[in-house]
Image (spheres, helix red, strand yellow):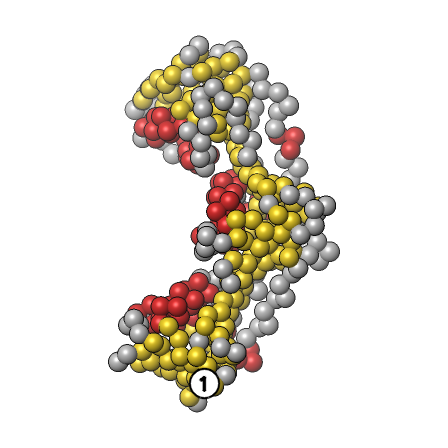
């Protein structure tokens, strides 16, 4: 292999591709990144059997060829190169990287041991990257960290025509984000369960100026592909049945309360200063006021009152402050609508643009209240 390439383009491509390499790979070969110089491009790929990444950038190819080297090491080298042309060449058991007066030699890894990349499924549809990234951020709020229940570490993606619904739950809360997109088939009906950590990684690496193409074969539902700005990722799907959560949303909520989102967030953070571990923050709604309080009588305490637009009977509910902050932070609108039934049943949180406007159902956050003593 002999290739000439822009050093910054090389650094960006290796950084993006090698991000999927695990900290502790199952076998040494999975710590490698595969480079293939062919047809005026340098193609890069990495794979750990669960997620793959492929990228390609323009290059002057003097001799086509393939090399596998340590991905993290190549990424560190590439980002340190001077802002000049970089030259890659294989010689014996080494890959040489030269830029300006800097030169490095990396030990080649056995190419024959490198696993074949998964076949990218057929195109399902596309959406603008900013919308997709925002939905991932919102939906993944409630992803569980309990590896003993793999289905709860995932985000359920439901596709129905031009509507996509992404849902996650850790049993204490539920987050659901919805958006419209452009499906290849207008009569599309499909469901995929994708690990939340993989989706978050995809969202962080997107070029938000371009669309995201989702690839999926509903007849062989084991893999989902994500294409964006010439880069392709695939993720192995979780095999399991996501819990039936639609019944958790109440048909009617007799109590509604609308508050300024930022004022509420700031107040909760102040209350949380005096809470022990995951002790609850209480919210007592009465008339046009809500009083937030935290702490017990024999401990440090805090209280604060906020104005509220209330419709329904007085009610007091209590929440885990961290869960409350997570859900409110995922809402982008300036106002919050809390919809309640009783002090012990799940409360729904929605955003709305104006204090007197309708709530948006593009993002729905359910949080189960905590039991408390006065």
**In this rendering, would 110 be left or right of 223?**
left
* Residue lying at 28% horizontally and 72% vertically, measured from the top left: 82
Location of mark 1 (residue):
62
Q: Where residue 279 appears, x then y in whole percent? A: 41, 29
* Residue lying at 56% horizontally and 80% vertically, measured from the top left: 112
- Element at badge 1? strand
From this view, report whether residue 12 is shown above or below residue 112. above
From this view, report whether residue 261 is shown above or below residue 144. above
Question: Badge 1, how many Cα within 10 Å: few under 14, some, many 20+?
Answer: some
The answer to whether one can see residue 170 in this image is no
Q: Where residue 290 appears, x then y in whole percent? A: 41, 16
Residue ranking furthest to the left: 101
Q: Where residue 153 appears, x then y in whole percent? A: 55, 47
**In this rendering, would 263 be left or right of 239?**
left
The answer to whether one can see residue 356 in this image is yes
* Residue lying at 70% horizontally and 46% vertically, measured from the top left: 186
């Amino acid at each position: 292999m002999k290739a000439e390439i822009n050093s910054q383009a090389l650094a960006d491509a290796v950084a993006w591709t090698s991000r999927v390499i695990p900290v502790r790979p199952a076998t040494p070969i999975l710590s490698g990144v595969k480079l293939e110089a062919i047809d005026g491009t340098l193609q890069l790929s990495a794979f750990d059997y669960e997620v793959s990444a492929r990228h390609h950038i323009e290059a002057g190819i003097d001799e086509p060829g393939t090399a596998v080297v340590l991905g993290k090491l190549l990424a560190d080298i590439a980002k340190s190169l001077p802002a000049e042309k970089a030259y890659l060449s294989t010689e014996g058991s080494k890959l040489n990287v030269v830029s300006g007066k800097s030169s490095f030699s990396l030990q080649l890894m056995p190419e024959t041991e490198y696993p074949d990349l998964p076949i990218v499924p057929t195109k399902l549809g596309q959406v603008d990257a900013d919308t997709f990234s925002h939905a991932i951020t919102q939906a993944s709020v409630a992803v569980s960290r309990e590896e003993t229940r793999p289905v709860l570490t995932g985000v359920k993606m439901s596709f129905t025509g031009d509507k996509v619904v992404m849902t996650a739950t850790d049993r204490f809360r539920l987050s659901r984000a919805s958006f419209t997109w452009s499906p290849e088939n207008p009569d599309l009906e499909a469901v995929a369960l994708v690990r939340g950590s993989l989706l978050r990684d995809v969202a962080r690496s997107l070029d938000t100026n371009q669309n995201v193409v989702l690839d999926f074969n509903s007849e062989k539902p084991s893999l989902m592909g994500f294409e964006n700005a010439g880069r392709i990722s695939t993720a192995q799907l979780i095999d399991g049945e996501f819990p039936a959560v639609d019944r958790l949303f109440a048909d009617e909520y007799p109590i509604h309360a609308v508050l300024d989102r930022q004022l509420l967030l700031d107040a909760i953070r102040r209350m949380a200063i005096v809470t022990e571990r995951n002790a609850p923050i209480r919210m007592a709604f009465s008339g046009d006021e809500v009083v937030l309080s935290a702490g017990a009588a024999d401990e440090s305490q805090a209280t604060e009152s906020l104005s509220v637009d209330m419709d329904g009977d007085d009610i007091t509910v209590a929440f885990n402050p961290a869960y409350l902050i997570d859900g409110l932070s995922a809402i982008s609108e300036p106002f919050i609508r809390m919809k309640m039934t009783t002090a012990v049943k799940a409360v729904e949180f929605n955003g709305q643009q104006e204090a007197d406007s309708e709530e948006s159902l593009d993002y729905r956050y359910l949080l189960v209240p905590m039991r408390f003593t006065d």
